[in-house]
Structure formats: C-alpha cells, structure tokens
Image (cartoon, grey):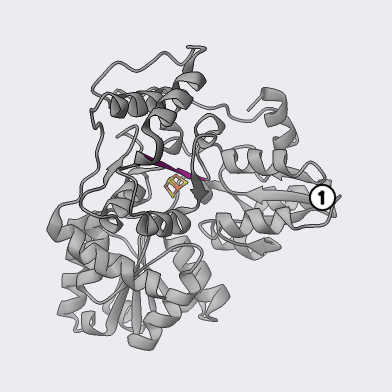
C-alpha cells in the first residue's frame, strides 16, 4: 500500500507503519524481498504445480500475497473451503497457524497443508493454553458445574483447545456464526465457557442474545478459580476466557466520537472482536465477510470508518472508489503475525513444492485431530 493511500485511509497523518520483521522460520534461503522477479517466479511456480496446489488467503493478508489466492475469505469461509477441497495435493494456507491446523484437520490424510512462515501465529490463540483450560475445567468440575457448561471455542484457538471442546460436547464458532452457536449451546446447557476471545463472547451474548453484562464473568487463567468467587461463577451464564485480539482490542470509543465530530454523516462498522464500548457505539458490527458486503453494497457517496485489520480496509477502500472508506483508528496497525507471510515466503514455498520438497507442513497429531474434528464438524453442521 502506498504511503499516500495509507494517509488517506487514516484521514490525518500517516499512522504507524508496517514493521517488516523477517522470519527465520524456513529451512532454505528466502528470496530477497527486493528481487524484481518475485511476481513472475510465483506465477511460474503456481502454473507448474497446476491443480496440485490450492492457495487459501485470509482477508488480512498483504496485497502481494492475496493476489495469488485461489480462494479468499475469513477463517470460517476458508475452513469450509478446506473441508470441500478434496483434489489438491497441497493446500498453501496464507493465514496464521491455527487456521492451517484447522485446514489439516478438515482435509484428507493424502493432502498436505503448508504455512509459508511458521512464525505466523496468533496472539489471541496463544492466550489459552491446553493446561490452563484443563485446570479451568477441573475447577468447574469440582464445583459440580462442568456438566452444565458447554464450551464454545472461537476458531482462533489452537488444535489442542478445539480438541478439548470436542471432547466436552462443545462447538467451534467464528465471528460469522457466534450467535447461532451460542443459541445452540444454551439450548444444551446452563452455562457457556467461551474461549479465548472475551470480546466476541461478551458482544454476542449481550447484543445478540439479550444477556446482561452481569451475566458475564471473566476467567483469568493466571489466578486460582479464574480470580472469581464461587458465587460469581455459579451465578454467571457466560464464563469468558481472558483473551483478546491484539489488533481489534485496541480500537476505542474516542476514535468513533472523533470521526462523528469530523464527519457527521460517517457510518461506523467494526468487528465483534472489538471492545464492548466500541461495538455499542458503532452503527454496524460484523465479521470481515459482513464488513466487506455491507460497505460494498452501500450507496455511492457514503462514508465509512472501518474497525478491522488495515490490509482489509485498504483493499475495501480501493475496491469501492465511489465511497470514502477510512480506517477507524490511527494507532491501530496491521496484524503483525498475518503480515509475516510475504511474497518471498510464498515464492520459497511454491518453488520448493515444484522441486518436490514439502516445506513447513502443518500436521496435527491424530488424537488431537479426532476431537478437534468433532468440534469443527459440529460448527459446520450448524
Ligand atoms: S487479527 Fe487478531 S485474532 Fe486475527 S490473527 Fe491477528 S492477532 Fe489473531
């Protein structure tokens, strides 16, 4: 994205610039980012692989990578695409680690899922470890509450947490289907343990299901009993894990108020991983797919401030020249882990495959995969 286009998006100033840290998570020599033949090399390698390769690209990926994706989407759409894909030998997943794990779980044993940079993780997924979640479940069991509690786990979690969810009768959700999954869970049990994003859980419970903020408690995995009293746990309907997205969690109410003063006709649309005060102050809330549809289908001449990842907002602005599309907050930046997948890593991955070398394969162990699949298929069935 050019600096002038970035400045337009940010409305004032140039905001934070992209950190171009380079990963070392590959076993060969990465091409130089300055290599002028990178695009031609990617095209040639993709052509040489033909139908043996499918490239999935998350909406938050860089322009230089997303241009090579066969399918683009949010984590839900890409999980569906992986599940439906039965022919390609290689699934190159341009996204983050937990998404590649889900793709491996949902594809056949003969297919290989590849993450071009193994350092492309997710800070939110890392906020819930298997041992922390096991300890939480043990403490809920000691209170006699585990059997009444349904785990609902956001797609943005490790395979180990998805497996825990499948073993304990729960389901996976995404930002597209969180309401549907919570309604399913409350029809099945009295309480929900929502992992790992507290904001998506709270926003969906309060704004879509009509629960109160008092019905929700936050479980701090670093404290005994989540830092809660027995009474607080017993009376809660939603037990929210203390996790958040390091990108969406930074949008704030002040940015919305500032936009409304500067541009009274502005319409604000944000992702449900944002804080509750941001979601309630916005005009629209939705998954990345819903954000794209809403802005794309809006009337010409309308003005939008969008609270989600900057790569997506940049492409939304470029593909809607008849509207004004701004980034909601000048202090929020790209998802740094998503941005680790760059063109050199993609070229290295594709050329390695052409040479018969499978690099950076993501493989979930069979036991974890078995119960993760139970939870993922429950979501897809809903
Ligand atoms: S945008 Fe947030 S939830 Fe998505 S990969 Fe980045 S840190 Fe994780």
- Horizontally, is 171 left or right of 58 in the view? left
Q: Is residue 55 magenta?
A: yes
Q: Main secondary structure of the magenta part?
A: strand
**Where residue 104 sits in the image (x, y, percent)?**
27, 51
**Where residue 186 sits in the image (x, y, percent)?**
39, 84
- Horizontally, is 300 left or right of 294 in the view? right
Tell me: residue 378, above or below residue 186.
above
Instruction: Tell which of 80 and 320 is nearer to you.
Output: 80
Where does the N terminus fall, quadrant-wise? top right
- Horizontally, is 8 left or right of 206 in the view? right
Image point 29% across, 69% down: which residue? 375
Residue behind mark 1: 261
The magenta region covers: 53-58
Tell me: residue 239, above or below residue 125.
below
Residue 135 found in image quarter: bottom left
**Where residue 197 sits in the image (x, y, percent)?**
41, 59
Image point 68% across, 60% down: which residue? 282
Q: Is residue 178 magenta?
A: no
Image point 44% across, 23% down: which residue? 44
């Amino acid at each position: 994205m050019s600096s002038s286009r970035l400045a337009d998006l940010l409305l004032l100033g140039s905001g934070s610039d992209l950190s171009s840290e380079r990963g070392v998570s590959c076993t060969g020599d990465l091409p130089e980012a300055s290599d002028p033949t990178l695009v031609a090399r990617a095209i040639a390698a993709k052509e040489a692989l033909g139908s043996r390769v499918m490239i999935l690209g998350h909406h938050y990926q860089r322009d230089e990578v997303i241009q090579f994706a066969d399918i683009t989407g949010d984590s839900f759409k890409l999980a569906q695409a992986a599940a439906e894909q039965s022919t390609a030998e290689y699934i190159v997943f341009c996204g983050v680690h937990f998404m590649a794990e889900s793709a491996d779980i949902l594809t056949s044993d003969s297919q290989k899922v590849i993450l071009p940079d193994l350092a492309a993780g997710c800070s939110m997924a890392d906020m819930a470890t298997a041992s922390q979640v096991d300890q939480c479940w043990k403490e809920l069991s000691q209170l006699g509450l585990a059997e009444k509690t349904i785990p609902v786990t956001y797609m943005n979690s490790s395979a180990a947490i998805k497996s825990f969810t499948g073993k304990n009768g729960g389901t996976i959700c995404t930002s597209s289907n969180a309401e549907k999954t919570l309604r399913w869970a409350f029809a099945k049990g009295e309480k929900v343990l929502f992992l790992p994003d507290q904001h998506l859980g709270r926003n969906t419970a309060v704004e879509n299901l009509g629960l109160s903020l008092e019905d929700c408690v936050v479980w701090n995995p670093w404290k005994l009993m989540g830092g809660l009293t027995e009474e607080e746990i017993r009376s809660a309907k939603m037990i929210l894990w203390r996790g958040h997205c390091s990108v969406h969690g930074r949008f704030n109410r002040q940015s919305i108020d500032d936009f409304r003063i500067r541009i009274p006709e502005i319409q604000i649309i944000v992702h449900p991983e944002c804080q509750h005060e941001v979601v309630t102050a916005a005009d629209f809330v939705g998954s990345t797919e819903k954000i794209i549809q809403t802005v794309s289908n809006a009337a010409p001449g309308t003005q939008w401030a969008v609270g989600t990842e900057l790569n997506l907002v940049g492409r939304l602005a470029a593909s809607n020249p008849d509207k004004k599309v701004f980034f909601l907050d000048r202090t929020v930046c790209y998802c740094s882990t998503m941005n680790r997948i760059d063109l050199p890593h993609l070229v290295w991955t594709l050329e390695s495959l052409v040479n018969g070398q499978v690099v950076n394969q993501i493989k979930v162990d069979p036991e974890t995969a078995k119960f993760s699949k139970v939870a993922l298929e429950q979501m897809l069935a809903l």
